[in-house]
Image (cartoon, grey):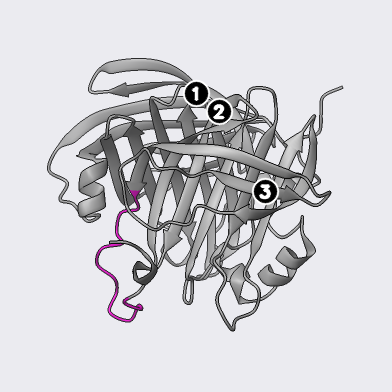
Amino acid sequence: MVADLSGGIPVEREFVVAEKPDDGIRDAVNVWIEEENGLFAMRVGVEAVGAQWDRHELWLDIAFADGRLWSRRGAGEPHSPYDTQGRPSVRGTGPVRFECAEPFRRWTAAFDGPVARTSAQEILDNPDFAETAWSKVAFTVDMEMAAIPWEPGTILPEAAEALGGKQGDYMSPRYEQLFRCSGTLVIDGEERAFRGNGLRIRRTGFRAFAGFWGHCWQSAVFPDGRAFGFNSYPVREGEPPSYSEGWIIEDGVRTGARPVVIPWLRRLVTGGEDVSCVLETVDGRRMKIAGRTFANTRSRGGHVLPPDWPKDWPIVQQAHAVYTWDGKRATGMIERSSKPSVMEL
């Protein structure tokens, strides 16, 4: 019998929005990928926004542990959302394409096009760096899902309450699913086959950022099948409780957990940062997961803010880490953001 990896989420949510929705609606596919030995990692995503439906957004970062970075932002003509069977299983734009081959079990990603060369240090110093050097980049990735999805707000009652208010607008309706993958990456003719781990995010609905003040989000799957994940917003004095929710998977069973030690973003570095965390399960056990980043990038576009945005808008850092849990090692993701006023800049 094949295990059900849907986690009870309707299969229709795996398929993309095929026709233009209302202006406030986004439909997105994003993946984080970490090479299993921690040599490189990538984040790639396509955002289809209702107000600009004829120009889907592309986000791509390919970061190496030695500090090299290839980065591209932009928008392009959308691909047809329909596959050869007539299902709306494709989300693509310009040089990138995602396809749902089998809901909750297998997705593919492919890219073929120019990408700007930079470094983790340059992105840290200037997230709006001038794109003056380009490489020819191509990759294919085959993703096999490794755990049931996590839908934020469905595990802890206090998390559901927090997301039921304004805080729910910051992430929009979504779910996340860990996977293992294999693929090929080619940069300027140099080809490398790889195996890795990753996290896939399907997000469809309204999303707004006004009032957002920061977060810490971590996740990984281990060779023995154990996995963990959490997302937390910092506590604000005099405000309603902040969203904070986590979980672990052991022997195929997911148990809710509360993050009790969280590595908030306090400085900007290019790698080698301690991002260890501690989760306390709902049955009272404490799980310490050691972590150290091997590739850090700062999200591009955060340097110059629109004139009507707060000056203390959170800085976002996307990174990839090596995690160790009871002697087992795995690579995984971490994304954090903090207001400059609470950071050591």
> Is 302 a magenta residue?
yes
Residue 36 is tagged as 1
**Quadrant of image for the C terminus:** bottom left
Q: CA distance from mark 2 to mark 3?
A: 17 Å
Tag 1: amino acid:
Glu
The residue sitting at the bottom extreme is 238
Tag 3: amino acid:
Leu
User: Do the numbered discs 2 and 1 sit on residues whose CB atoms are within 8 Å?
Assistant: yes
The residue sitting at the left extreme is 132
Q: Residue 24: horizontal and vertical position, in percent?
A: 52, 70
Residue where numbered disc 2 is placed: 330
- Mark sitting earlier along the chain (2/3): 3
Seen in the picture, residue 201 relative to 185 is either above or below; the reply is below
Residue 279 is tagged as 3
Horizontal side of 224 relative to 38 (left or right) equals right
Residue 79 lies in what quarter of the image?
top left
Q: Residue at x 33, y 30 (%)?
A: 65
| Residue 15 shows in this picture | no
Residue 101 lies in what quarter of the image?
top right
Q: Residue at x 55, y 25 (%)?
A: 181
Q: CA distance from mark 3 to mark 1?
A: 23 Å
Dominant SS in magenta: loop
Dot 3 lies on which element? strand
